[in-house]
Structures are given as structure tokens and as C-alpha cells.
Amino acid sequence: MKKILILGGGTAGTMMANKLRKKLPLDDWSITVLDKEELHYYQPGFLFIPFGIYQPEDVVRQKREFFSSGINFQIAEAQEIKGAENKVLLKNNQELEYDILLIATGAQVVPEETPDLKGKLWYTDIFDFYTYEGSTLLAKKLENWEGGRLVINLAETIIKCPVAPLEFTFLADAYFTEKGMRDKVEITYVTPLSGAFTKPKATKMLSKLLTDKKVNVVPDFYLQRVDNERKVLVSYDEKEVPFDLLVSIPVNKGADVIEQSKMGDEDGLNFVPTNKHTLQSQQFKNVFVIGDATNVPASKAGSVAHFEAEVLTENVLSYIKGLPFEEKFDGHANCFIETGYGKATLIDFNYDTEPLPGKFPFAGVGPMALLKESRMNHLGKLAFKWIYWHMLLTGKTLPVSTPMSMAGKEKEEEVLV
Amino acid sequence: METTLSAPILATNEEGYLKNYKEWTEEWALATAAAHNIELTPKHWEVLHWLRAKQAEGVALSLRKAGNSGIVDIKQLYALFPGGPLKISSKIAGIPKPASCI
């Protein structure tokens, strides 16, 4: 009996376990998923919790509910991956051997990376919304907040779901407007990038949203530290942004076990060096990496993990048969972006093609507008929660092509906005 | 965007970033740096070559990664490329502008 070990029972790890279980005979291959936590969080739902659109209980389930039979799910924390010996050492000193290892350990927010971000104002005037705790506490804060300077700050550029901070900003505008207190709130979006939008077509199509919603943008601001006494963000080049309420997207890093195993990128962020097309680890032939855990230049998002899982399933099967890898991951991502007031826009892109306007053909659902606000996109975003729990995690096929398709996209400039 | 006369004319996008990072030459980098009032020192070149190596490896880049590269820390990177260290260093290194997904 040969062994597949999957580290991480989140979005990517769960999909891979279910997909591989369907393809591999029970008599020949065991599949074990290891995770340190019992609970599975629907992370895209964290965005909606601060505004009371979702309640905390809407986004939590038990991890073990989602594994098909024949998958062994074990709660334990990995201490070290011993790639040269084909085994993983657990914190409880047990050792798990494997023939094939899949690393799906994700990314985590690490506010401790920035001096004084997690200081005395943490969870009183400074919040994150990328964790269950942060988004839930922020909901309580917003409920009673009387207004002032709301600052949304990205501490880094490599973050999970890079559009979520922008969605948060749009939803905040709608939330305070609907509460009749938008005039009491100044919203400022502070980013280390050159703007809130950075891709040419998206900038052209969507920049108006920021002016319409009266959002100030501070670009090229790279956070060095937070001054808790004066309530200001301080950048590496000594610029300052004052805040009353800070919604921070802290630095993201890979899992601690990657660091303990010395398997991270040399840059210290604990993302695993991975071939961006095959998803094979750069270090070990029988180790594959998927989802937020990789260092590939794709977005850290569930849709990316989904498209990667389609490719990686084929690659693992090829590896087992000793065949060359045929499936090539193209960096495909597909994301709904909430813009407030029951509308959303949609982007679809890959390593080489920026988000383009046009129509996106969802088989069985119909065309959805790309880079344009619509009610239908918003309904698509809400429907995705059901799809996530019932189809995506269990490894069912979704009506979206794995490689990015140019069908419906408009390449040239003549776009009517 | 035009670069100075001595530099090779290479295809760039509307913001002056090289369309194909493989066409990059050191002369082009010198001219592009000069357009940003930067005179390239050995430290600058080290950063530029590191950025190009990362691009060739196909990995995601950020300021923090550059700051953890062992070549410079983030403050030094700001000193070398004032105004927008990763943005300007990427342009001179001939690699795409650091961007989000939209």
C-alpha cells in the first residue's frame, strides 16, 4: 500500500484529497490529510461579517464533513517535513511516512511582522478582517462606531485575495451610507502599490468607482510601523497617515512548518519554491505544492487553488505512472469583486493576460459582465458560498474551464463603459 | 516612452516598463536609471540582477522579499531607488511593474 500525505485540510487540501480518492484504487493508495484545526472556515465570507451581511456561524463547518470515504483525516500539528527521508515529524513526535506529499498549508496573516501593529490598539481601534476573530470583532466595532477616519491599509503586496481590501472599502462606503452616517466617515485606502488599481484595463474601467464613492487613495505607501500613541501609520520613507479606525491587512506568510523545515523561499516569507506550471516542489520530486502555500506569481485565492487542483490531480496521476507532466497551470484566477449596494464586478485572468472587459460565459448560468458592475455578479458571488460547500470542496466539476479562455473577452480599446 | 539616444530602443508599455524582460541590456538600464536621476552603483546592479533572477524563476515579488534578499534592507532599497523602490527598480531591471490582480 502506497501513501499520499496531504498537509493542510483547507480549500486546496480538501479538494485534492477528494479528487485523488476518486482516481486512485483504495487497495493501492491510502490518502491521509493532516490539519491542526477541526474547523473549516469559508474565508471569502470573512469579508461580509463586519457589515452584518453574514453572521459568524455562516462561515464555519467541521473539516471532517467534507472528506469522502476512504480518506483518513487526522488532527495533529506537523513539526517538520523531512523531505530527504519521505516523512513528516509531528509535534507529538509521531512520524508519518509518505510516497507522495502534497503541501497545502496555506498562508496566514502575521501582524507581528510590523512593529506595533499588534500593539495596545489591536482589536480596539486596529482590526484585521482576514481571520474569524478579526472580522467578528470588527463587526461589533462598526456597529457602535460614531465615525472618523477609517483607514484601510495593505502592509504588503503578496496577500490572500488581493481584491478583498478593495471590496471591504466599497462595502464600508455602502454600509455607512445606509446607516445615514457616510458624511461622518472619511475613507482612505493606503497601498504599497502604485494605486488601488494597477492593471491598465481595470484602472480604465473601474477607477471611477473610487471617486464616486469618495475614497481617498494613498499609493506607494509601504508600512514600516504603527504609532499607537499618535494613531498614525508610518512608512519606510517617513510619510504618515493618521487614523481613528485602522483596518489592516497584515503581512502574509506561509505556515510555520515550512520555516521549521527550511523549505521556504530564501526571502523568509515561508512560501514554498514551486514550479509555476507543474506545481511540483523545486526541491523534491515527490512533493507537490498547491494554493496559498506556493511562491508562484498567481493570486492567493480559492479560485486559483481550484484551477490548480484540476491540473495537479492529473500531474500526480502522471507522476505515479512515471509519465511526463501534461497539464500546465496557466495562473488562471476568476474572482467576483463586491462593489456595494448589491452589485459586483468580475475579473478573469492568468499569468499572461490581465483582466479584460467583455462577457464571461458561465456554462448553464449565462454570460456575466467582466470589469463592469452588475446585480448578477453580486448574486453569483453570494451563490458561490453554496457552490463552495457543496461542489468545490467535494471535488465536483464546476462549469468553468481550467485554462483561462479568451471567449467573450474584448481585447481592444473600443469599450463602452 | 523614449529613452536617451545612446540606449537601445526597446519596446515598452505606456508606463515605460519593458514588454519583454529578455530584451533588457545594461545600457538600457543605465539610460532608464538616468531618466529617474539614479546613477547605478555596484549595489544597484546587485539588486537589479537579483530582481531579474527572481523574474526568471517565476516567483511573486514584493518589497519585503527584496528587503530579505540579503543584498539590502528596505531602508537601503528606498535610499537606492527613492520614491517607489520596487516600482522603479523593477522598471530599470526590465521586469514588469509590481501589480495586484486588477
Image (cartoon, coloured by chain):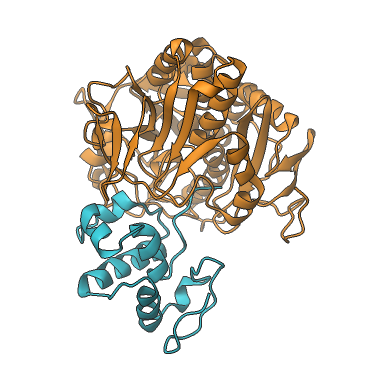
Chain colours: A orange, B cyan
Depth check: A66 or A179 in front? A179
Depth check: B95 or A40 in front? B95
Image position, residue A134 (x, y; %): 39, 20
Residue projecting furthest to the bottom = B6
Does A151 appear above or below B49? above
A417 left or right, relative to A62:
right
A71 left or right, relative to A95:
right
> At 47% across and 21% down in the image, what residue appears?
A41
Residue B74 seen in this snapshot: yes
Residue A301 seen in this snapshot: no
> At 64% across and 31% down in the image, what residue appears?
A396
Depth check: A262 or A84 in front? A262
A386 left or right, relative to A253:
right
- How many numbered discs, if any? 0
Residue B72 figure quarter: bottom left
Image position, residue B64 (x, y; %): 29, 49
Does A62 appear above or below A382? above
Residue A391 figure quarter: top right
Image position, residue A78 (x, y; %): 27, 30
Image position, residue B20 (x, y; %): 51, 72
Residue projecting furthest to the front = A183
